[in-house]
Image (cartoon, helix red, strand yellow):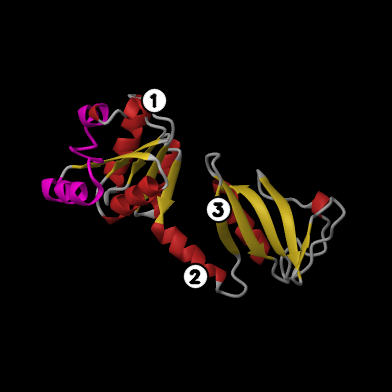
Amino acid sequence: MYVVIAGGGKVGYYLGRSLISEGHEVLILERDKRRADSIAEELGSVVLRGDACEASTLADAGTARADVVVATTGDDEDNLVICQLAKRMFNAGRTIARINNPKNRRIFSTLGVDAAVSSTEIILSQIQQEMPGHALVQLIKLRARDLELLEGIVAPTSPLVGQAVGRLTLPDECAVLLILRRGEAVIPTPQTVVQSGDELVAMCRHASEADLRAMLTA
């Protein structure tokens, strides 16, 4: 697999090093000469000095044959530009962007970025999993755009309590896949009745996440 990494900071450097150790072909794009030289000394000829926001740099990097382009700079706007250029001008296989502000996720998705990764959201998710009774925790964002796997605890006051799964009025494009009840996994059937304290694992569109959270805690 050929991976182009835009940004040779700590994130880009360690990502590149890990991918190289797994046997992948990697090229890191870095515009700062000192940083590019440092990467070359440590990893070899896997770095190209240039601005990844410029089409000429992406062309020199062979972006047209890249399986994945990852934008890891510290600037959300730059990462968006890089991913759009890679997709629209070079038809790169898949684009992944680092985002610093979680609120930018929807913009990235709307503009065609395949995946946006927020370290803020990842850390928050880990904290939430340690908070008893937290309403909804994102387990993973699936490859399909805006599709998420979520886990939430049903509050005693939730309108879901006492309802059969087949009769639940869930937000648009949400589906209950699994119920965790008293340490046991229950594969729900249409007749399975939701109980207070159940942990529901659901597939949901990002746009419906807030509605599902409100339903669990109502």
Callout 1–callout 2 Cβ contact below 8 Å? no
Quadrant in which the C terminus is drawn: bottom right
Q: Nearer the viewer, mark 1 or mark 2?
A: 1
Visible in this render: residue 207? Answer: yes
Q: Amino acid at mark 1?
A: Asn
Question: Is residue 114 toward the left or the right of residue 71 in the image?
Answer: right
Q: Which mark is residue 25?
A: none
The residue that disc 1 covers is 91
Classify 201 as above or below 115.
Answer: below
Query: What secondary structure is marked by label 2?
Result: helix
Classify 83 as above or below 129.
Answer: above
Please name whichever residue, 77 or 114, is drawn nearer the observer in this view of the structure: 114
The structure residue drawn at horizontal position 46% and vertical position 65%, both measured from the top left corner, is 124
- Looking at the image, tell me whether mark 1 or mark 3 is earlier in sequence order: 1
Visible in this render: residue 218? Answer: no
Name, please, the residue furthest toward the right: 191
Please name whichever residue, 131 or 210, is drawn nearer the observer in this view of the structure: 131
Q: Amino acid at mark 2?
A: Ile
Provide residue 123's location: percent of width, then percent of height: 44, 64
